[in-house]
Image (cartoon, rainbow, N blue to C red):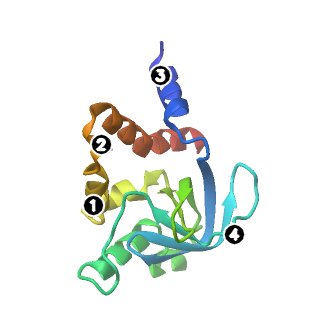
Amino acid sequence: MKIANIILILFLTLTPANAYWVALNNPKVVDGDTIKSSEIYDLSTGNKRTEKYVRLIFINAPELNEQGGKNAKQTLETLTMTNKQAKQSGIPQQIMCFIYKNDRYNRLVGNCFVNGFDVSLKLLSYNIGAKGLKKALKKPKYQDPKQLYNFYMRFYHANLVYKDFK
């Protein structure tokens, strides 16, 4: 069996049934782990969503009034190209996100992509918001190797799908 077929089977079995892609138009970074958009479109239906905020999955950046909060926001602005230099350059500011669920504040939660890279993974590589991932991995269900593998696959499968989606 080809590796592509194996990846497709894993994706189909591990992807939550209610997961979907959205496009964020006119995005604005709220803080180090949340993006606001005036228009969020569900790409599977073409309908405009009522939610206005997207929370990056597994990222728990410091609040703006906490140490490192402003740095986290500036880094996310740079990564999502919503900073002043990007706006002045005329670069289209559309972000695509693979949404898994809504949180208790009715924010969409998922992986967001800009120019082919996963913003959450990039933030983690800069050690921004890593305590969210560490907290998730401390849950008892992830002590079981099979559950940890499923967790890993859910977190990374959006990157595989995005490459095919572009």
Disc 4 crowd rating (10 Å Cα; few below 14, some 14-19, many 20+) is few
Asked if one can make out residue 114 in the rendered structure from this viewpoint, the answer is no
Mark sitting earlier along the chain (4/1): 4
Q: CA distance from mark 4 to mark 2?
A: 33 Å
Which residue has dot 3 on it? 6
Residue 117, image x, y percentages: 43, 52
| SS class, disc 1 | helix
Q: Amino acid at mark 1?
A: Ala
Quadrant for the C terminus in the image: top right
| SS class, disc 3 | helix
Which residue has dot 1 on it? 130
| Dot label at residue 71 | none
Instruction: Please report contact status of discs 2 and 1: CB closer than 8 Å, yes or no.
Output: no
Side of 34 relative to 25 (left or right): left
Q: CA distance from mark 2 to mark 1?
A: 17 Å
Q: Amino acid at mark 3?
A: Ile
Mark sitting earlier along the chain (3/1): 3
Mark sitting earlier along the chain (3/2): 3
Which residue has dot 2 on it? 142
Q: Amino acid at mark 4?
A: Thr
Going 37% across and 41% down the picture, which residue do you hit? 151
Which residue has dot 4 on it? 50
Residue nearer the viewer, 121 or 15: 15
Q: Quadrant of residue 57?
A: bottom left
Q: CA distance from mark 3 to mark 4?
A: 36 Å
Say above or below: 58 vs 80: above
Q: CA distance from mark 3 to mark 2?
A: 23 Å
Side of 148 relative to 34 (left or right): left
